[in-house]
Every structure is written in C-alpha cells, then in structure tokens.
Amino acid sequence: MKYRLFEAILWFFSLLLTPTLHAQKSDTTLIYRHLNRITKTDTYRHFMNIPLLDETAEYILQEFTNWADTVFYQTYELNGQTYRNVIAQFKGISGQKLIVGAHYDVCGMQQGADDNASGVVGLLELARLMNLKRPKFDVELVAYTLEEPPYFRTEYMGSYVHAQSLVPTKNTILGMVSLEMIGYFSEEKKSQSYPLKWLRIFYGQKGNFITLVNKWNKGKFARKFTQSYRKCSVLPSKRFAGPKVLPGVDFSDHLNYWKFGFSALMLTDTAFYRNKHYHEQGDTMEKLNLTKMAHVIDGLYQTLLLH
C-alpha cells in the first residue's frame, strides 16, 4: 500500500515537472473543418478552374486574416489569367525570416485531400498556433498556386514566383519548409515503399512516420531544423537526404528555393511511396489520419519555437 502511494506521488510530481513540449495544441476539429471546406467542392482545384482556385485562395486569405499581422495576394499573369499565392506575415524580433509553404492546387479531376489540402491546412493551423506564442524570427506562410502539372518545374509555379521575389532580401532568409502531403499514415506491413528497395532496411515497411527530406549539401537551416523537429515530434519522424535526381527528393515547392540558393526541406508522408491514391480520385479526406496530422503540425510549431 505504501509503495503504491509513493508511486502515485512520483507520478503526480512527474506531471508537474514534465515540459509541455509535447502537449497537443493542434485542433482536429478545425483540421476537419478546413479539409472539408477545401476538398468537398463540386469541381476541382486544377489550373484551368480559375473560379475555384480564386475561391480557395479567398478562403485561405480570410483564415489567415484572423491571425496574421499582414495578409495579401502575390499575383502573376499566365495565358491571360491571374493566379494567386496567398501570403501571411508574422513579425518577430530577430530581423530574420522563415518561409513555410504548401500548394493548394490539385492535379486533374480529384479532391486532393492529402495532395495537398493537408499541407494547406497545416499552414492554417500553424497560423492559429503562432498566436499562442511566436518564434523570435519573422514567419511568412505561403499558400502556392500552380505546383502541379503542367507547370511543375517551370517558372510559372507559385513557389518559383515567391522564391524569386525573396532574392533581394536573401541575407535575411533563414530557410524554407515545404508541407507536402502530411495526412496519410498506415500501420499495415508493406504499406511503405521507397525509390530504392534496400532503404526499407533502415526506414521500415510501415507508413507510420513523417519524413524530413533534404538534398545533399542542404545548408545550415535545413540541417538544424531537421535535428530539432525529430526532438520535438511525438509522431515517429525520419530524415532522408539524397541527390536531387533521386525520384521524389525535389517533388514539391522547396525545389524552387534550392534554385535560388536558399536552404530548404520538405516535410512529407512520402506521397506516392505510401499513398496509392496519389493523383487519383481516391485522394479524399476520409482516408487521412487527423490525429497524426495534428502531431505533424505540433512538431512543426514546437520546432519553430526552438529556433
């Protein structure tokens, strides 16, 4: 009896003394609401559907407006049409700036819940969380247009336009984090594949982790961010660095920041190496794990506070 009482006392004080670093702050109810609003539409967010792209951009802008210091569109013209990045700025005290971005367009006739409404919802929740406590540096959240084909790897990607606009202030930019598909997880054996089969020896065969993808010579920011995130994350996280030519390493908006010499990385559930509904009509919000998605966002938020 005395032992049990002593054990209970130790447990109680451990709760008082344990850091709140891993306390969940992301709200799965809000995550659900945002996913539902962005994906459950009558038409699809592809490059030809300008009205829905504009409607989605407006929703993101209005949500950002609830939390950010400054919110605006970064617009550009293509084939007589206007496309919009949505930017939210949060002021810090260090004079340096970190970029976190995710694209809101989809590839073809599909809802694109994981690819990439999940990343956009990550931005929206991060915007809300930064009003609990802000990092010491400026943070710029960017929702990009035109990441998907036919404009992938062209100067018409929204992230290319944004990265290029940062060049005059390059010395103040810490780095960039791309949120690319952060909602699909599986505990099934062989649910995770890789560009090289032998990688399963090191990373496992279950798609139950989040990955920080870097290129070789990734730069100080990407290296430090990756180390910090792995300490902060409740969800299992793994790091991967490889050459840009390895399929998947540069398959998102971070590639354009590399082009302009910024240190950047991708936070991802590994896309088509796990989610077999990639670029298919089956990519719906019902297949996402909102609790684990919340853990991904919390890990990101806590990592920003450490830098």
Image (spheres, rainbow, N blue to C red):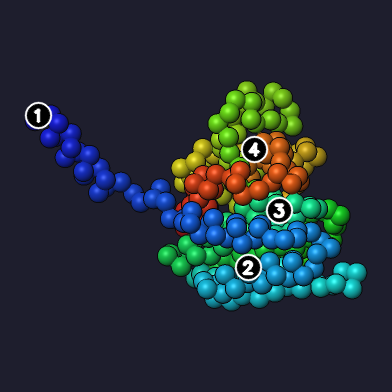
Work out whether 237 lies above or below 116: above
Q: Is residue 47 left or right of residue 14?
A: right
Query: Which is closer to the viewer, label 4 or label 3?
Result: 3
Question: How far apart, in angstroms, are the residues tagged by discs 2 and 4?
Answer: 30 Å
What amino acid is found at the position of numbered circle 3 in the picture? Gln
Mark count: 4
Question: How far apart, in angstroms, are the residues tagged by discs 4 and 3?
Answer: 28 Å
Query: Which is closer to the viewer, label 3 or label 2?
Result: 3
Comes first in the chain, label 1 or label 4: 1
Comes first in the chain, label 4 or label 3: 3
Residue carrying label 1: 1
Residue carrying label 4: 240
Find numbered disc 3 in the image and state the secondary structure of the residue it sits on. loop
Find numbered disc 1 in the image and state the secondary structure of the residue it sits on. loop
What amino acid is found at the position of numbered circle 1 in the picture? Met
Work out whether 77 lies above or below 291: below
Residue carrying label 2: 60
Find numbered disc 4 in the image and state the secondary structure of the residue it sits on. strand
Q: Give x and y (percent) for residue 73.
A: 70, 74
Comes first in the chain, label 2 or label 4: 2
Comes first in the chain, label 1 or label 2: 1
Comes first in the chain, label 3 or label 2: 2
Work out whether 19 lies above or below 137: above
Q: Residues within 10 Å of mark 2 (few under 14, many from 20)?
A: many
- Circle on res. 111: 3
Q: Which residue sits furthest left?
A: 2
Q: Are marks 4 and 3 in contact (CB under 8 Å)?
A: no
Query: Which is closer to the viewer, label 3 or label 1?
Result: 3
